Image (cartoon, rainbow, N blue to C red):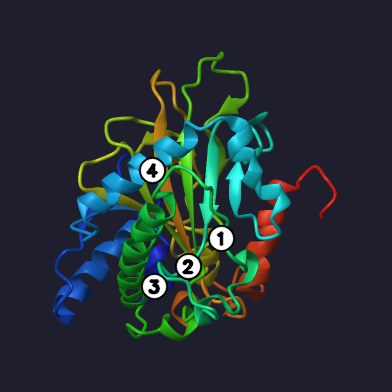
Amino acid sequence: MSLAEAAAPVSGAFDGVPIIDIGHVSTPEERIALAQQIRDACMSVGFFYIRNHGIPQETIDKVFSAIKAYFSLPLETKMKLFHREVSNFKGYEPVLDSNTDPGNKGDFHEAFEIGWEELVPKERDEKRVNDGAMAGANVWPSEPAGFREACLNYYHAAVGVGKVLFHLFALALDLPETYFDDKTKNCSATMRFHHYPPQTGPEDDGIVGIGAHSDFECFTMLWQEPDIQALQLLNSEKQWINAPPIPGTLVINIGDQLARWTNDVFRSTVHRAINRTGVHRYSIPLFFSTDYHVQVEPMPTCVSPERPPKYEPVVAGEYIQQRLRDLYYRNTALS
């Protein structure tokens, strides 16, 4: 049965999120078995947890401490790196600066965004020669001490996990394991650090942590602060399903770019974050895309006479850049 045929009967009426152990990928047989689990999750839910991902707990603890310290700084200090004054969207985003869901009044979180950078900077980093929508250097605050190092240590560890996942996604799509290698030579992965203050207003005030949306890129890897429920996924029955933090795991979700590429065989699921716990919440999403000039069009394995191509070809970087501009400048003239 082809992927296009296999996707036809999948309803998307999920009531939970599968957990997949990726700790055993040393043999082709193990990778194929994992790819089958990932395929099932991507078709039915569009989200899954991974355990045994290999990122050291010490690396997670250090970046968590660093972002808590950063977001505790005075607003005027953080606004020195205001992202709207940086051409590549990097830097600081204050509370209510974005409004992901046009039906809402704003997103009740603040954020800081970075892209690829070596721990020891190179004069000419080949991975950033053409990294597209997010091209250009990161901007870094002068405090707290050790912020850059903690962020980049986690970033590089997570990018390593992302490379493994690209191979598994290829196998899940009945493609050669290295299919994405020549499409991800430059590291088009952007990381955001989120701080969600407690929401204390009325539930119908139109302000949530982040409004209902789907992600732009190929896939997202999310670390969630333990013990604080906020993430919710929308199933095909229009029910919101909680995706709580599970110790030792990361959350993976398919984005619109990979959904387009797979002709919607893989599901890009709408989700949101609502923090009504009474405590502050932190999270770290890492968004994986492809190189800027990659042509994204429905893959042959995901097309059939009964499932013709749903999307016109697009250039990956142009697509992401336009989506970012739509998000940040929806109601203002483009800069």
Count residues near mark 3 (Cα–Cα under 10 Å), then give few for <14, some for 14-19, many for 20+: many
Q: Nearer the viewer, residue 50 or 285?
A: 285
Residue designated by label 3: 3
Q: Position of residue 127 (x, y in %)?
A: 50, 78
Kindly report which numbered mark, 3 or 4, lies closer to the viewer in this rendering: 4
Count residues near mark 1 (Cα–Cα under 10 Å), then give few for <14, some for 14-19, many for 20+: some
Q: Position of residue 283 (x, y in %)?
A: 40, 42
- Marked residue nearer the N-terminal end (2 or 4): 4
Q: Check disc 4 and give the amino acid type.
A: Ala
Q: Residue at x 63, y 47 (%)?
A: 81
Q: Residue at x 34, y 80 (%)?
A: 174
Q: Is there CB contact under 8 Å for labels 3 and 1?
A: no
Count residues near mark 2 (Cα–Cα under 10 Å), then give few for <14, some for 14-19, many for 20+: some
Q: CA distance from mark 3 to mark 2?
A: 37 Å
Residue designated by label 1: 138
Q: Secondary structure at mark 2?
A: loop
- Marked residue nearer the N-terminal end (3 or 2): 3
Q: Nearer the viewer, residue 121 or 231?
A: 121
| Label number found at residue 117 | 2
Please give left or right for residue 173 compared with residue 329 in the image: left
Q: CA distance from mark 3 to mark 1?
A: 40 Å
- Marked residue nearer the N-terminal end (3 or 4): 3
- Quick check: can you spot residue 107? no
